Image: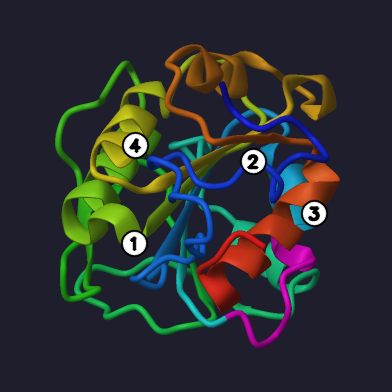
Amino acid sequence: MPCSAGEAYACGMHTPQPTPGEADVRTEPYRIVALASSAGGVTALGRVLGELPSGFGIPVVVVQHLDPRHETVIADILGRRVKLRVVLAQDGVRMQPGSVYIAPPNRHLLVDTNGVLTLSSSELVHFLRPSADLLFESIAGAYGAQAIACVLTGTGSDGAMGVRAVKDRGGTVIAQDPDSADFSGMPDAAIKTGAVDFVLPIEEISGVLTGLAQTGSFP
């Protein structure tokens, strides 16, 4: 069962619990956070990203479903609310700590083991491009247990397959509490996979991300 609101630190990691007296501390630091959202996502992203500290030490990659027929100003909108650098992802760019990279409209976003971004116009996944499933599968393959995936508000089920991949590789999965989401479809679908470690209201997500990124432990 995933942790509920208020229990995020109390119930520990999803991996087997340590024996009595053994510190529940990760041996590997987290290296990437991936966020996924759809309907209602700009507001949710602004809330989560806006509460991350300027010293947040790992890169953040984002899939937000956008209208493929139009250019987007999402990076500008979020950049005004966020202490971190926010940009649209570009093909071949190496990620930098403390920067946020958003998938452009109509392009899949992938990450390799060297932290280099790839944009793809390959076929739609469940009628979507960009696909949260592809991004999550990408970070699972590249970073394994050092990856964090987070599913926010949105309709449909994008991200549900991807969170299973992250979980299977030892990563950590967070879902927004559906009761705090404008649209509960995506977080509900993620939770139903059984792969979610933490179910949190929107106001608690950034604090948990900050704790994981900075300490790699569960106090």
Specify the segment rendered in magenta: 49-56
CB under 8 Å between callouts 4 and 3? no
Which residue is label 3 attached to? Answer: 47
Q: Which mark is residue 11?
A: 2
Q: Residue at horizontal 69%, vertical 62%?
A: 49
- Comparing labels 2 and 1, the label whose residue is closer to the camera: 2
Residue neighbourhood size for the residue with mark 3, other residues' Cα within 10 Å, grouped as few (<14), some (14–19), many (≥20): some
**Which of the two labelled residues, at mark 2 and mark 4, occupies the earlier sequence position?**
2
Secondary element at image label 1: helix
Relative to 80, is 169 above or below?
above
- Horizontal and vertical percent for residue 1? 56, 21
Q: Is residue 37 left or right of residue 139?
A: right
**Which of the two labelled residues, at mark 3 and mark 2, occupies the earlier sequence position?**
2
- Horizontal and vertical percent for residue 44? 74, 44
**Mark 3 to mark 2 CA distance (whole Å):** 25 Å
Which residue is label 4 attached to? Answer: 167
Q: Residue at horizontal 32%, vertical 41%?
A: 166
Q: Residue at horizontal 55%, vertical 66%?
A: 217
- Comparing labels 2 and 4, the label whose residue is closer to the camera: 2
CB under 8 Å between callouts 2 and 4? no
Report the amino acid beneath label 3.
Answer: Arg
Report the amino acid beneath label 1.
Answer: Gln
**Mark 4 to mark 1 CA distance (whole Å):** 11 Å
Would you say the magenta stretch is mainly helix, strand or loop?
loop
Q: Residue at horizontal 73%, vertical 21%?
A: 178
